[in-house]
Image (spheres, grey):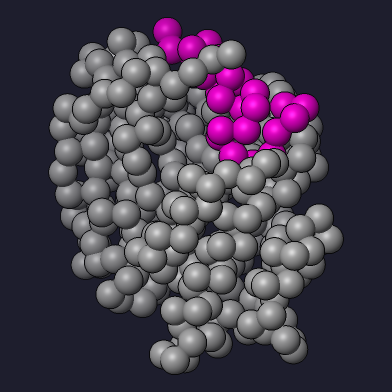
Amino acid sequence: MRFFYPPLSALEQGMLDVGDGHQVYWEVSGNPDGKPVVFLHGGPGGATSPLQRRLFDPAAYRIVLFDQRGCGRSTPHVATAAPDENNTTWHLVADMEKLREHLGIERWQLFGGSWGATLALAYAQTHPDRVTEMVLRGVFMLRQSELDWLYRGGAGALFPEAWETFAALVPEGDVLDGYRELLDDPARAAEAVAAWSNWEGAIVSITPNPGLAATYAEPRFAIAFTKLALHYFANGGWFAQDQLLRDAGKLAGIPGRIVQGRYDVVCPPVTAWELHRAWPDSKLTIVPRAGHAVTDLGVLDALIDATDEFRH
């Protein structure tokens, strides 16, 4: 089995003014002269953590992490301000370009899981000449079918007890519409945030994982995770229908490694399979006894195999 690389500290960190009143937190660790890689966290509304630095050989990589608009250590945080019209997928793509230029990086590797994979695909299809390789986990392309699976009962067939708790707050009508209304109700917003975040925390791993569940339940994380997810999903990620799959041909010439849990309930394997079929330069590894979480058996092994393969 492979394990995370040893803990390491950030060498540089700062706040980048990306416009529209937003400041984005960034950090660099590893080898200052190494191969650049940028880690794209999940969500929308997740955050970076020191553990994410450890997916990469620190002797070989210059490791860039950043918190996307509205979450993590970026400001303003949606815990104190509602998501605004200047927080879209395309703003995040532009932020990545500003960060790349700020750090003096010509081209970099993209690493992203779940929503991070969505953002990686959007960036790579917009700026293919800036991407050396891509490592994706638990692919999510924000298509209507994927939202229906996760929030309109598909995944609930496998986790009925968790789904019952999640859906109970919206006894009638569409769950996504209902949760958006709950967030606008000051008397029920906190309850809705906790239920939304706990739903994904309950299904993220193939086996119960109290540590992951606690992360999703942490109030500041849960607020950003819920508010930004609903903001992005209500707008279809600002994508045309099936855009990321339709435009997979723009990834031609970019080597990719896709790691997918066979029993990923959050992002079922069919999405990774369809992307792989449309992206000739990709290789797909389906991990036989894993779900969505990095910590599920075999997922970490495959991810570090991929980053090690691309490190030189």
Please indicate whether residue 298 sits to the left or right of residue 113 in the image.
right
Image spot of residue 274 (x, y percent) = 78, 39
Please indicate whether residue 63 sits to the left or right of residue 281 in the image.
left
Image spot of residue 44 (x, y percent) = 48, 57
Say which of 22 and 224 sits in front. 224
> Magenta stretch: residue 158 in it?
no
Image spot of residue 290 (x, y percent) = 70, 33
Give residue 73's quadrant in the image: bottom left
Residue 82 can be seen in this image = yes
Image spot of residue 34 (x, y percent) = 29, 14
Image quadrant in which the C terminus is located: top left
Image quadrant in which the N terminus is located: top right
Please indicate whether residue 134 sits to the left or right of residue 150 in the image.
left
Say which of 165 and 292 sits in front. 165
- Is 164 placed above or below 276 here? below
Q: Residue at x 31, y 43 (%)?
A: 66
Give the mark count: 0
Q: Residue furthest top?
A: 312
Give residue 254's quadrant in the image: top right
Q: Residue at x 51, y 24 (%)?
A: 133
Q: Residue at x 43, y 41 (%)?
A: 40
Q: Residue at x 65, y 27 (%)?
A: 297
Q: Residue furthest right?
A: 157
Say which of 281 and 36 sits in front. 36
> Magenta stretch: residue 289 in it?
yes
- Is 308 placed above or below 201 here? above
Image: magenta residue range: 287-312
Give residue 160's quadrant in the image: bottom right
Residue 149 can be seen in this image = no
